[in-house]
Every structure is written in C-alpha cells, then in structure tokens.
Image: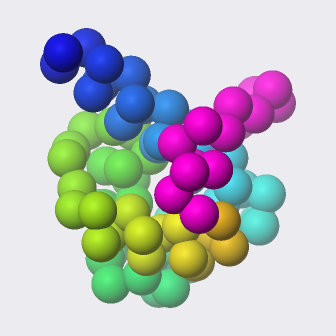
Amino acid sequence: MKSEFEKTYSRIGKNVKFLRNQLGWSQDELASYCSVNRAKISRIENARADYMLSTLLEVCNALKTNLEEIIKLQPTAEY
C-alpha cells in the first residue's frame, strides 16, 4: 500500500512542477499564491513529505487546475 501512495505523491509532484513551469513561475512565486513557503512547494514537487488536502487544493487553485487533473495528468514533456 505504501508503494501506491509513493507513486501517487510522485506523480502529483511531477504534475505540480510541470504546471508551475508551464506558467513560468518559480517555486517562490507559486508559494506566494498559497499559504505555504517555497520549501513546502519543493517537498511537494519532490514527493518528500505528506501534505494536507487543503494545501494541495490551494496549489491546484493557484495553478488553475483541479484535484482530479493534478492527480491524473501525465505530461509527455521532460521537466
């Protein structure tokens, strides 16, 4: 079961990074639209920590996407 969580967190992190880069934002810029700091964005993108659903919803809102998309998006470009 832990393996599935790790895969999901990793996919979400990659998707957050991809969408952030698509907007041309730094981690600091994304963090400024959420109630977190740059280090938290880094931990999300690198799947280094669990986070609250409310934090993920704030990130989705800032990236102009929704929870479903951030979980399933699988961009083909390398980032």
| Residue 15 placement, left or right of 64 | left
How many discs mark residues in the rendered view? 0
Q: Residue furthest front?
A: 68
The residue range painted magenta reads: 66-79
In the image, residue 58 above or below residue 24: below
Along the viewing direction, whichever of 34 and 42 lies nearer the viewer:
34
Point 25% across, 38% down: residue:
48
> Where residue 67 sits in the image (x, y, percent)?
51, 57
Point 56% across, 51% down: residue:
68
| Residue 44 placement, left or right of 68 | left
Q: Is residue 20 magenta?
A: no
Point 47% across, 85% down: residue:
32
> Where residue 69 sits in the image (x, y, percent)?
63, 50
Does residue 17 show up? no
Q: Quadrant of the N terminus?
A: top left
In the image, residue 47 above or below residue 31: above
- Which quadrant of the structure image shows residue 73? top right
Q: Is residue 78 magenta?
A: yes
Point 22% across, 56% down: residue:
51
Q: Look at the image and name its color scheme.
A: rainbow
Does residue 65 show up? yes
> Where residue 23 sits in the image (x, y, percent)?
77, 67
| Residue 34 placement, left or right of 5 | right
In the image, residue 14 above or below residue 69: above
Along the viewing direction, whichever of 3 and 26 lies nearer the viewer:
3
Q: Quadrant of the C terminus?
A: top right
> Where residue 50 sits in the image (x, y, percent)?
20, 47
- Which quadrant of the structure image shows residue 2? top left
